[in-house]
Amino acid sequence: MDLHVLLTGATGLLGRAVYHDLQSRPDTRVTGWALSRASGDIHSVDLLDFETVAGKLQSLRPDVIVHTAAHRKPDVCENDPDATVKLNVDTPRHIARIAAGLGTRVLYISTDYVFDGTSPPYRPEDPTNPLNTYGRSKRDGERALRETGCDYRILRVPILYGNVESPEESAVTSLLDIAKASEPKNVDHWATRYPTHVEDCAVVIGKLICRWKELGTILHWSSDEPMSRYEMACAIAEAFSFPSNHLIPASQPPPGAPRPRNSHLDCSELESAGIGRRTPFKVGIAKALERFVVSKK
Ligand code: NAP
């Protein structure tokens, strides 16, 4: 019998890749939920409307819920903690409570920002210590899920990029503007990040759902290429043959919400299970941005 997966956030950066991957699997049937960008097969369901969500979950009775919807921009979250808590903490708690009653499994997507970045690499059981509102809300979302007693898995991932609707959609692809600028640009060389392709995460999620019982409750997936934003901008410049001598490495913490310096995730559990895929950054970023770069040929 087909596995029925309900995917929240199906129009988001990660959700689109997961929806596409799940749709391609012969044994899986996927229902996608989103909000402002819902169209076609993706249903518009406001997750903050708890009564409607409860009714729809009772009638759909999916086998698994993959919950990706969240507020995920740290500076936006810092300025609106109430809205952040509603979507990132209260909503997963509500979904997980209903799931517990239905016997539905819940996969909650979380972040490396639950860690403070002072002692990488981080294993799933390491103590969390988020530095900003976004990281705290995702940590509290994890806790809320656990408290409901539902059958859950938490998958933490770091900074994501992939098939973007516009370069601004991801903090990685948004470096295109800086990479192609002609005037000098200071770019963060203080923090080490592990830019991870959403299609690689989607493959991990697809396998994790099928091998649920074999795996621990908290899992990590990440690329294995450490890069500062300065190094990412240089890689973008190289991919499109832009000069890079205007890029200046900045060694001070960047302004805005405090961020971890290096929250590298230890992925050994999924690696030993043979689950995972890693797209090399220079391949993934060139593909993600090629349609936004005017060819000089
Ligand atoms: P995203 O691109 O911002 O997408 C957010 C999704 O949530 C959209 O589909 C949006 O729908 C939906 N949504 C927002 N408010 C909603 C509401 N009230 N009701 C229903 N749906 C709502 O996010 P993402 O980058 O794909 O992130 C996915 C997950 O990965 C998040 O849990 C995030 O914390 C985690 N994560 C992301 C990154 C990253 O770099 N992006 C890094 C680490 C972890 P509409 O757009 O249709 O309104």
Image: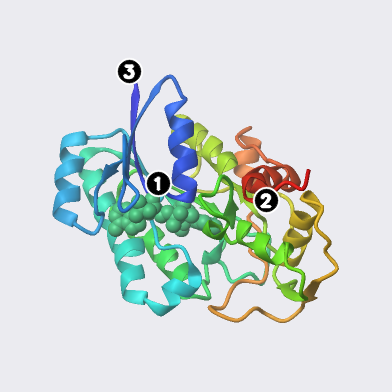
Q: Quadrant of residue 77?
A: bottom left
Left or right: residue 169 compared with residue 148: right
Name the N-terminal-most of marks 2 and 3: 3
Residue beneath label 1, please? Answer: 11
Q: Quadrant of the C terminus?
A: top right
Q: Does the residue tagged 1 have its C-beta within 8 Å of any atom of ligand 1?
A: yes
- From the image, tell me which residue sits under label 2: 293
Relative height, residue 181 to residue 292 (above, below): below
**Viewer-nearest of labels 3 and 1?**
1
Q: Is residue 158 visible?
A: no
Q: Quadrant of the N terminus?
A: top left
Q: The residue under label 3 is which amino acid type?
A: Met
Dot 3 beta carbon under 8 Å from ligand 1: no
Count of residue discs = 3
Residue type (three-letter) at the residue carrying disc 2: Val
Q: Position of residue 250 (x, y in %)?
A: 76, 77
Which of the marked residues, 3 or 1, is nearer the chain's N terminus? Answer: 3
